[in-house]
Image: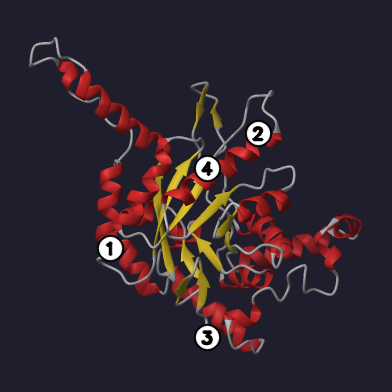
């Protein structure tokens, strides 16, 4: 059967794409991803702060200390806050492109309009096949309107699209007053793809030290419900491709996203917890399901259960919400939970 797909104009051998994570810091890991069947890989993110830090340090050390003696300590940069700087990231792209045949998607993470967006051009010149723009923006100013927040997203997308000719996907969160309208605006701004959804960092409290601490939690299969719903709703309403991310751990999780309308399904948490070779298991489960349901290709199944194609489109909206609450059976729910634990889902 044919499990090939297209995403951002790229031909992929599989809809299973490895999303941005620390796993892509090592070239040998990316080679293992290719061997395990990954259709493409998204590299770990380069942050706006890293680029701006380098620009500021360069300006500082070109102009500062002209009146100081040569051995002044201020001539030496402060220790960097990140493992790899912008130039090392570009070198990493070049090395990865020389080591694997699958498409390599660079990742740029930012939240504001600035000169950092022009770095996308450097990523393209380094050999990236496409760019995933991860807009991580938490508006905390109560005087900032929803329209202003949304316009920031659009302006960032426009700035990056003006800088490059390679495809650009936008990874965004679900926290918009009208997500469907936001998807439409990003589509019109030139986004070649939408990655749904970004899992924003949620801080935690250390009760012993009375400090706010970072706390990264890996996704669970339950997290897939949100992107599943919105991909199914958006399918057929926008031109941009769609990538499903968050909560994809098994072949059945991938199947659901493809049926909703996703071009690809992205995985990171499952590979971090189960190993890169878990990709082989997911692909085998995908093929097994397709054979059982007599699907010949991924393209044939894509969008088959989108809101556009199901018999009851209201299943994705308020009517199904009311039905879910009024028909909830605690005993049946406990039985499903036990079955999920048995299968390790």
Q: Residue 205 location in percent, x, y? A: 55, 28
Q: Residue 324 location in percent, x, y? A: 86, 58
How much space separates mark 4 and mark 2, taking CA atoms?
12 Å
How much space separates mark 3 and mark 4, taking CA atoms?
37 Å
Q: Residue 60 location in percent, x, y? A: 26, 22
The answer to whether one can see residue 135 in this image is no
How much space separates mark 2 and mark 1, taking CA atoms?
43 Å
Q: Secondary structure at mark 1?
A: helix
- Towards the viewer: 138 or 178: 178
Residue under label 4: 156
How much space separates mark 3 and mark 1, taking CA atoms?
28 Å
How much space separates mark 4 and mark 1, taking CA atoms?
33 Å
Residue under label 3: 2
Of labels 3 and 4, the one closer to you: 4
Residues at discs 4 and 1 in contact (Cβ within 8 Å): no
Residue under label 2: 148
């Amino acid at each position: 059967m044919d499990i090939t797909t297209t995403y951002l104009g790229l031909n992929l051998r599989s809809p299973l794409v490895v999303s941005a994570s620390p796993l892509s810091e090592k070239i040998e890991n990316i080679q293992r991803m290719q061997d395990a069947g990954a259709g493409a890989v998204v590299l770990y993110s380069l942050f706006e702060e890293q680029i701006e830090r380098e620009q500021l340090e360069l300006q500082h050390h070109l102009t500062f200390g002209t009146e100081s003696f040569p051995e002044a300590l201020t001539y030496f940069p402060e220790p960097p806050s990140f493992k790899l700087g912008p130039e090392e990231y570009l070198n990493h792209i070049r090395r990865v492109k020389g080591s694997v045949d699958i498409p390599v998607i660079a990742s740029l993470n930012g939240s504001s309009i600035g000169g950092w967006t022009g770095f996308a051009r450097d990523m393209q010149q380094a050999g990236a096949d496409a760019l995933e723009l991860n807009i991580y923006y938490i508006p905390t100013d109560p005087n900032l309107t929803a329209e202003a927040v949304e316009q920031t997203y659009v302006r960032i997308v426009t700035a990056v699209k003006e800088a490059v000719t390679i495809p650009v996907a936008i990874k965004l969160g679900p926290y918009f007053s009208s997500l469907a309208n936001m998807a439409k605006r990003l589509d019109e701004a030139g986004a070649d793809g939408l990655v749904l959804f970004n899992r924003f960092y949620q801080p935690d409290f250390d009760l012993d030290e009375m400090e706010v601490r970072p706390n990264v939690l890996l996704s669970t299969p339950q997290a897939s419900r949100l992107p599943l719903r919105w991909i199914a709703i958006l399918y057929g309403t926008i031109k941009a491709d769609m990538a499903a991310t968050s909560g994809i751990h098994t072949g059945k999780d991938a199947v659901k996203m493809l049926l909703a309308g996703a071009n690809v399904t992205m995985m990171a948490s499952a590979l971090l917890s189960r190993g890169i070779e878990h990709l082989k298991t997911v692909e085998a489960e995908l093929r097994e399901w397709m054979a059982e349901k007599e699907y010949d290709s991924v393209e044939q199944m894509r969008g088959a259960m989108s809101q556009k194609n199901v018999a009851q489109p209201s299943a994705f909206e308020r009517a199904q919400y009311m039905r879910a609450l009024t028909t909830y059976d605690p005993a049946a729910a406990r039985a499903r939970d036990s079955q999920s634990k048995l299968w390790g889902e």
